[in-house]
Structures are given as structure tokens and as C-alpha cells.
Image (cartoon, helix red, strand yellow):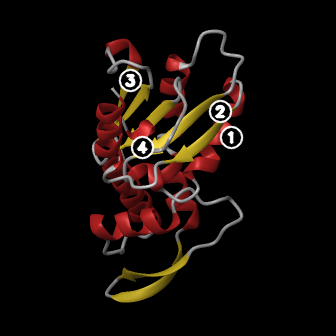
Amino acid sequence: MAGRAAGAPAGAIVVDMGAGATVVCRMTSEPPGERDMVIVPGGGDAIDLNLLERLRLKLPNGEFTISGMRDLKERYGCLLDSDSALVGLPVAGRTAPVDVAESVAAASRAPLATILQAVKSLWPEGRNQAVTVVLAGCGGQLPGLELMLAEGLKTLGGGKVMRVPDPVFAGAEGALARTVHN
């Protein structure tokens, strides 16, 4: 339904990254069936935990919270390798300047291979045609995610990646649009 809210064409594949799971679903004219979707375990919360573990390994005296990790993820997301992200983090009772770019990027990119595998399993017959992928859900709004996903789509035959305009209400807006047009 989120894909309809974004104005995606029929046959598009929606990647809805929520907190606990990522649902990858092919858009058809009918409600999706089991063969039209793949549920990938882990979503935004898994990225937060991955980032927490990475920073704890890097800074054993760091005093980090899941909420703080979520903020870093949402601010920096899938950074390019050349990017820097210098932030003040609590380490041993003091605020220390830490470049978190590598850790945030690695944690944010961790689910990409699994998501691309799910997209591949739903790819249209012939697989030589480009497809539109719609990023939905709050996790789908990670900075840089669309660039990383578009790069991964090149190995499958190419495609365009777009985001829903409002990740919180896109599903409801798509359902409403479907009801109005039927």
C-alpha cells in the first residue's frame, strides 16, 4: 500500500523497513499473497544494536544507550566511505570527540545484502528489466540508503529507488487510494 502512496508503478517492489523487521513486497493489482512478499528478520532496532556493539568494541569505556545509537543512525545512516562524522560521545565520564562514520555506515549497511536477496526473489520474470524499488517505513528513510540500494540493484539488472513521502502514514494513504480507485 505504501508504494501506491508514492505513486510507484505496478510491479514495483516495496522495501518497508520497520523497527523489528523489513517486509519486501511486490506490488500487484491484488492484495499481496505469500509469494509476493518476503519478511526479513531485523529492522531498525537490529541496526541500533549492531551500532552499539561496534562502538562498545571501539570504545570499551563508552557509556552508550540504544536511544543514542538510534539518533546516530538516523542522522548519519549509510555514509559514504569518504565521509566523516565527528560527534561528542560519553566515554569514561567525559564527552570525547569520536568519528563514528565507519561504525554507523557499517551497521546501517549490514542488512543490505539480505534485503537485496529478498528483492531478487521477487524480481519480475526475465530479470533483465529494471524495476522500481520503493523505500517505506521509518528505517527506509536512512540517509544514503537509497544510493546503496540503487548500487546493489545494478547487479540484478538495474532499477530506480524512490522513497515514500511520509513513512508513517504511507501504508494508510495507499490503502485509502486503493479503496477510492476500486
| Distance from the alpha carbon under mark 4 to that under mark 2 | 22 Å
Q: For the view shown, which residue lies furthest in the bottom direction?
A: 94
Measured from the top left, where is residue 154 in percent x and y?
71, 32
Q: For the view shown, which residue lies furthest in the front direction?
A: 181
Q: Residue at (63%, 72%) from the top-left corner?
A: 84
Measured from the top left, where is residue 124 in percent x and y?
58, 15
Disc 1 crowd rating (10 Å Cα; few below 14, some 14-19, many 20+) is: some
Sequence-first tag of 1 and 3: 3
Residue holding disc 1: 151
In depth, the one of 59 and 155 nearer the eye is 155
Q: At label 3, which amino acid type do we have?
A: Val
| Distance from the alpha carbon under mark 3 to that under mark 4 | 20 Å
Q: At label 1, which amino acid type do we have?
A: Glu
Q: At label 4, which amino acid type do we have?
A: Ala
In depth, the one of 126 and 96 nearer the eye is 126
The circle on residue 38 is 3
Residue holding disc 4: 5
Residue holding disc 2: 153
Callout 2: SS: helix
Disc 2 crowd rating (10 Å Cα; few below 14, some 14-19, many 20+) is: many
Callout 3: SS: strand
Q: At label 2, which amino acid type do we have?
A: Leu
Sequence-first tag of 4 and 2: 4
Above or below for 114 versus 138: above
- Of tags 3 and 4, the one toward the viewer is 4
Measured from the top left, where is residue 98 in percent x and y?
52, 78
Please give the count of numbered marks on the rendered protein. Answer: 4
Disc 4 crowd rating (10 Å Cα; few below 14, some 14-19, many 20+) is: many
Q: Are marks 1 and 2 in contact (CB under 8 Å)?
A: yes
